[in-house]
Image (spheres, grey):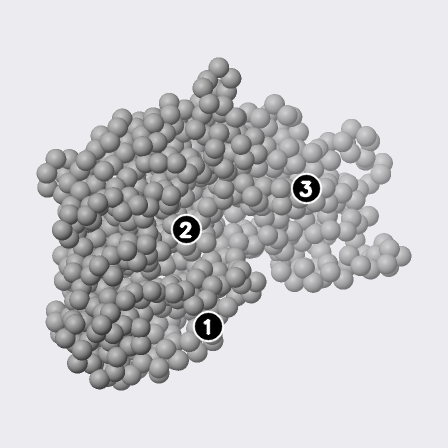
Amino acid sequence: MNDATGLPQTAVVVGGTSEIGLAILEELAKHRLEAVLLAARDRSGLERAKARLEAVGVGAVSLEECDVTKAEDVERLVSSAASSLGTVDLVIVAAGQLGTAELDQLPPATVLEMMGANAGGPAAAAVAFASLMAGQGCGRLVVLSSVAGLRVRRANFVYGAGKAAIDGLALGLSDAVRDAGVSVMVVRPGFVRTKMTVGRPEAPFSVDATDVATAVVEGLERGAAVVYVPPVLRYAFLVLRHLPRAVFRRLPG
Amino acid sequence: MAEEPAGRDKTVGSMTVPAANERPSRLAAAQRVVLSGWGGNPRSAADVIRPGSLSEVVPMLAEMRERSRSVLARGLGRSYGDAATSAGSVVIDLTGADRVVRTDGAVVTVEAGLSLDALLAWSVPKGWFVPVTPGTRYVTIGGAIASDVHGKNHHREGSLGGWVRSLRIATPDGEIEASPDGEHADAFWTTVGGMGLTGVILEASIEMIPIETSLVSVDTERATDLDECMRLMSAGDAGYRYSVAWVDCLRRGRGLGRAVLTRGDHASLAELESAPKKPRSVTPADPLAYSPRQLARVPFEAPVRLATLPAVRAFNEAWFRKAPAHRAGELQPLASFFHPLDFLGDWNRLYGRHGFTQYQVVVPFEAAEVVREIIEQLGRSGFPSLFAVLKRFGPANKAPLSFPAPGWTLALDIPLGRAGLAELLDRLDGIVADAGGRVYFAKDARLRPQLVRSMYPRIGDWQRVRDRLDPDGVFTSDLARRLHLLGDTT
């Protein structure tokens, strides 16, 4: 059960090899976390993630090979989460891929795959778990969006569009499940130094995965609806969102 | 939670539609509602049913067992945390069962959904008071017994369970008539303080205490720091039936734990007649007049955080200064002495959407320094605490999960919604557990399950009897799941 300080005893990470997702679990393991389920496509990555969590004392780690862009995988994931965890207190939707914004490297198949990985798959997982939680009568979803989705830039327009979609879906879902005892928290990090962004030029206000994890757990404790990492981005994007397009498209990066 | 078997009812919106080929389910009248305790957090949704009469409870339990639905009874929802919520379960709202069934001398038998408020309105004019009352009248008898509540008289008269002469308890298999030392004594003591996890309390017979007036003769004293407060209480409490201290947790250094002590007993008719200053409402001609009123009600959840550090500090200062340095024999109406917060209805809304938690612990007398440690750490942490209450407990009763045990008990209201509270309270839990103390389940919404066995060493006995009363595991609550009370307590 989630307690009054917002901390869960069980958690699922969709995108279970995500550095941010694992960092959040490591932070939660300092408190009440008892059992987790990690879901991702990559079996060996899952095994490494399991070892990492066991090292910080999470007793029960189950793994599920799962491609969130496949409906049957999402359905199987939700039912195995319910059976292995009992009550699913927290689901962290962390799946995603940065991909590219070079037109010559974006054939239709790649665009479809990226939209599936950043929007379609995470959306399917978020809605499926929200529905499970509505039946449970409790639970929290943490959806990893990005400030890239707040105003889509030319530098990562496919990724940004995917994040815009999942961000909007999460906000609407939050209102839809409120009366079922379920809450949704949207996390909007800026540039996070992880294996996904390695080799990319850093943007201003870059952070590490552990910074995101700390902010997410504090957000859970505060009962926050939207979390920016670092917090200053809330104000930066208040401005950036309203810049005239002629100015916005000339911004570096 | 082992629910969701094949063929389970489909929930459509707030309606639960029975599968075809079955007779109409009692669940048809259920409503999906998001519930919380008095602290406002955590919240969870359950299917709430209000039975028309107590005779419906046993068949209702049998049906839910058949459908593999878990069940919890709920009264007025005044426990602070998640004791009266149960995500996805069927919650039986018993507040409609509110009759006084019969009286036999001092013993009154009432339905479990009767509130203390209603019971007192009926009994005080007849010259009877409840043997134990918590700080609010807006609790049901059933909930009060399930929490084994205590009051300002615990040091002399124990908790409510010790005054209950019999209980009628519903299980899926039928009703049990349990008494403290006769038949089903183990069911009785498992249900007292059992947090609603042993069955549904339908009726209780309680021994009331006689009173001559509806007034309390109160002595008030100020203590300049915690040491003086504890010294005054240790020395003088035995001479008072009721005793409690309000402690200012926000002072540091000298003056840490300054306190206002209020102690007293029911005023006799002679005291009322000879009092130089008589209260307006109660006269020697009508010594049992009793009409407590709610003066105001908080209309909605506060949109901003009101319980900030400066606000609480100012409040504490005012509260301390308004108390006389020393005053003896003041006649106060029952409600002013026992239920001062009830004058303001729905006061929990002042804490806004994040709500608050009450941290109540007891530590043995020999570990009195833990009380100081808690107040110091809380003061240092910057979490504002309103209404810190300190009192001394007397001997424990036979109920394995009953909270009170000989020692000091401290209760603190702390606003939720700020990071860092979990870590602070976890640290304090550790200190309390090491000192042989415990946290009160009826207030709790955040304890770690690992500490339950050391805080409640007799939980194994409790679980054995509980499992016999509810072998199919029909009863559960969010508290029970969070703390693994029904098994696997590590």
Q: Are marks 2 and 3 on the same chain?
A: no
Tag 3 residue: A169
**Farthest residue in the left direction?**
B182
Q: Helix, strand, or loop for circle 2?
A: loop
Q: Helix, strand, or loop for circle 1?
A: helix
Q: Residue at x 21, y 33 (%)?
A: B176
Tag 2 residue: B37
Q: Are marks 1 and 2 in contact (CB under 8 Å)?
A: no
Q: Residue at x 15, y 53 (%)?
A: B106
Q: Can you tell which quarter of the image residue A172 is in?
A: top right
Q: Are marks 1 and 2 on the same chain?
A: yes
Q: Helix, strand, or loop for circle 3?
A: helix
Disc 1 to disc 2, C-alpha distance: 24 Å
Q: Chain of mark 2?
A: B
Q: Residue at x 57, y 34 (%)?
A: B13
Residue A40 seen in this snapshot: no
Q: Are marks 2 and 3 in contact (CB under 8 Å)?
A: no
Disc 2 to disc 3, C-alpha distance: 31 Å
Query: In the image, residue B10 lies at what x, y percent?
Result: 52, 26
**Amino acid found under the numbered disc labelled 2:** Gly
**Farthest residue in the right direction?**
A246
Drawn side of residue B111 relative to residue B395, left or right: right
**Count of labels in the image:** 3
Tag 1 residue: B309
**Amino acid found under the numbered disc labelled 3:** Leu
Drawn side of residue B165 relative to residue B262, left or right: left
**Amino acid found under the numbered disc labelled 1:** Leu
Query: In the image, residue B339 lies at what x, y percent?
Result: 32, 64
